[in-house]
């Protein structure tokens, strides 16, 4: 065990001053103007599993080092933390082996044995060290987000000449209740570029989400380059809702997103929506079309009119190419085939299609995901149904041994308006004010053992710019992050809204155009 002693003269000065002030006016913390150091009242989102306070403070300052000695797997996580601290409060902390640098306090990242849950971590915070223990780099990365959230936004006024940031001491033992905590970006209805997606990832990871679902194709736009079928992106990606320029990711750009996500312990789930929602693809390659009409580029909002021709082998050869190319660029285990709202596909054709496509997805080494409609097909239990509209579909999926992802539209759709005066968003599933989005129990839908997790989708028919996207996603996304992580017995709106209000400095520092709901007292 390393010990760290305070050798700076300033500490003695501070101590002396403390004794003097205490003698005159009472408890130390008030004279030193320390903010509350009760770890149990920290504004953490999501709320951890267990928090124990020891009511003292760890002083983060320029003499703090980040150590990953003996935990080589965590070196990148340590570097991430150093960068995050630098962005937040300007300190430039050394990383690597702290004991070699004569640091006075240390944040040490320690690799333990298996903690059970791969995202589990433990934080042991004392006056001179923060020990972050985890079994995996993903766990350490989640724990680092907790450390970030514990750092106050302003330094504490002490008698020391260097500023310090006081972190409350105690212990946090934490792990998520669901393994899959996602948000979906619809980059089809309106296209959002690589930098926009990266910023969304930055915000997701701060709240410990771990999956980014990209809705890459729809009637209004095809958004990823497919080398064997170049017109998909060139033609199918040439416009968007209301007739803007559209756009698409080159394979290089898509890989850049995937890599950025992986560096942040986020899994990307690519979605190619079919057999409906395929107008853009059919405009590029009309042989795909199965609705008997000549496909034209479409910039409207209503959908449900398009379908692939499910009885042509050439359509499956095409899908094989698309899945192969995207799967090769995507390290995560999932491939989402959409499957929703295929209103002009005959039911037997639809089922036949989903069954054949499951084979293709599996052939390319991925596990098939689809919107809840896919459960009517004869698919195996490795398929995952994302329940958005129809609870019976979820039950049918469970009967087939499938796992579910929850995205109930009236609770979890980020594109529903907050209130009737909202500029952006839809109302078809109802209004979703911040409290309604947060205050529900996923277990009331389906027993937990059948549920992989949650996905909050942001459909983009009504939003064209990043600030509009942010307005709908924030602050509601934070609630879904907590729903996915924190157990039901620990969650309630009244305490959540206090913690939420205290996210304002972070959201503002990140330049997020969040909706300042009047249900929350923003800091
Ligand atoms: C339904 S949810 C859709 C999307 C729309 C969304 C708008 C789902 C699987 N399909 O195509 O964009 O509503 O809220």
Image (cartoon, helix red, strand yellow):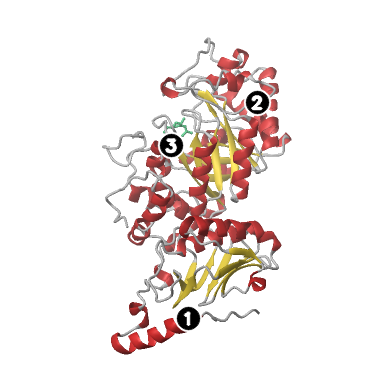
Q: Which of the pair 30/158 is nearer the observer?
A: 158
Residue 466: give its label. Answer: 3
Residue sitting at 34 percent across and 45 percent down?
Answer: 515
Q: Nearer the viewer, mark 2 or mark 3?
A: 3
Mark 2 = which residue? 226
**Quarter of the figure with residue 418:** top left
Marks 2/3: CA–CA distance: 26 Å
Residue sitting at 44 percent across and 83 percent down?
Answer: 13
Where does the image place residue 404, in percent across and percent down from the top left?
Answer: 55, 45
**Mark 2 or mark 3, which has the lower sequence index?**
2
Category of crowding for the residue at label 3, using alpha-carbon neighbours closer than 10 angstroms: few (below 14), some (14–19), many (at least 20): some
**Mark 2 or mark 1, which has the lower sequence index?**
1
The quarter of the rendering in which ligand 1 is drawn is: top left
- From the viewer's perspective, is 11 left or right of 3? left
Category of crowding for the residue at label 2, using alpha-carbon neighbours closer than 10 angstroms: few (below 14), some (14–19), many (at least 20): many
Q: Of helix, strand and loop, which one carries label 3?
A: helix
Mark 1 = which residue? 11
Marks 2 and 3 close (CB-CB < 8 Å): no
Q: Is mark 3 within 8 Å of ligand 1?
A: no
Quadrant assignment for the C terminus: bottom left
Residue 152 versus residue 503 in the image, above or below: below
Q: Which of the pair 495/400 is nearer the observer?
A: 495
Q: Nearer the viewer, mark 3 or mark 1?
A: 1
Marks 3 and 1 close (CB-CB < 8 Å): no
Residue sitting at 43 percent across and 37 percent down?
Answer: 466
Residue 59 versus residue 250 in the image, above or below: below
């Amino acid at each position: 065990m390393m010990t760290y002693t305070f050798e700076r003269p300033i500490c003695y000065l501070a101590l002396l001053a403390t004794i003097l002030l205490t003698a005159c006016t009472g408890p130390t913390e008030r004279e030193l103007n320390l903010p509350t150091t009760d770890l149990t009242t920290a504004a953490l989102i999501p709320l951890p599993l267990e928090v124990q306070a020891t009511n003292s403070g760890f002083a983060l300052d320029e003499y703090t080092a980040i150590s990953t000695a003996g935990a080589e797997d965590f070196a990148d996580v340590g570097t991430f933390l150093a960068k995050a601290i630098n962005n937040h409060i300007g300190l430039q902390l050394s990383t690597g082996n702290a004991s070699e640098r004569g640091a006075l306090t240390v944040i040490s990242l320690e690799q333990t044995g298996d903690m059970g849950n791969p995202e589990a971590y433990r934080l042991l915070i004392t006056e001179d060290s923060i020990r972050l223990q985890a079994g995996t780099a993903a766990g350490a990365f989640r724990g680092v987000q907790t450390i970030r959230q514990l750092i106050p936004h302003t330094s504490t006024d002490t008698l020391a000449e260097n500023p310090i940031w006081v972190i409350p001491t105690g212990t946090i033992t934490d792990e998520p209740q669901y393994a899959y905590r996602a948000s979906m970006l619809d980059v089809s209805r309106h296209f959002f570029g690589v930098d926009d997606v990266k910023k969304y990832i930055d915000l997701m990871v701060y709240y410990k989400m771990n999956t980014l679902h990209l809705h890459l194709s729809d009637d209004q736009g095809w958004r990823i380059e497919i080398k064997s079928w170049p017109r998909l992106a060139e033609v199918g990606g040439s416009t968007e809702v209301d007739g803007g320029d559209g756009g698409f990711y080159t394979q290089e750009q898509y890989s850049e997103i995937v890599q950025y996500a992986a560096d942040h312990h986020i899994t990307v789930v690519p979605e190619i929506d079919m057999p409906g929602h395929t107008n853009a693809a059919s405009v590029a390659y009309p042989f795909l079309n199965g609705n008997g009409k000549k496909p034209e580029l479409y910039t409207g909002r209503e959908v449900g009119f398009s379908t692939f021709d499910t009885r042509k082998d050439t359509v499956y050869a095409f899908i094989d190419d698309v899945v192969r190319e995207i799967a090769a660029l995507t390290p995560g285990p999932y491939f989402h085939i959409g499957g929703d709202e295929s209103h002009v596909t005959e039911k037997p054709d639809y089922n036949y299609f989903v069954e054949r496509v499951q084979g293709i997805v599996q052939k390319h080494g991925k596990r098939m995901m689809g919107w809840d409609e896919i459960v009517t097909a004869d698919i195996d239990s490795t398929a995952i149904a994302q329940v958005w509209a129809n609870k019976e579909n979820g039950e049918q999926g469970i009967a087939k041994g499938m796992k579910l992802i929850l995205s109930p539209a009236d609770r979890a759709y980020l594109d529903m308006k907050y209130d009737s005066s909202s500029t952006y968003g839809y109302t078809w599933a109802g209004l979703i004010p911040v409290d309604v989005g947060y205050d529900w129990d996923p277990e009331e839908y389906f027993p937990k053992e059948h549920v992989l997790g949650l996905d909050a989708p942001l459909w983009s028919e009504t939003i064209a710019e990043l600030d509009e996207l942010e307005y709908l996603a924030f602050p509601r996304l934070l609630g879904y992050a907590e729903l996915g992580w924190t157990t039901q017995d620990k969650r309630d709106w009244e305490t959540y809204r206090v913690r939420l209000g205290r996210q304002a400095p972070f959201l503002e520092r990140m330049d997020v155009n969040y909706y300042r709901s009047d249900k929350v007292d923003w800091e």
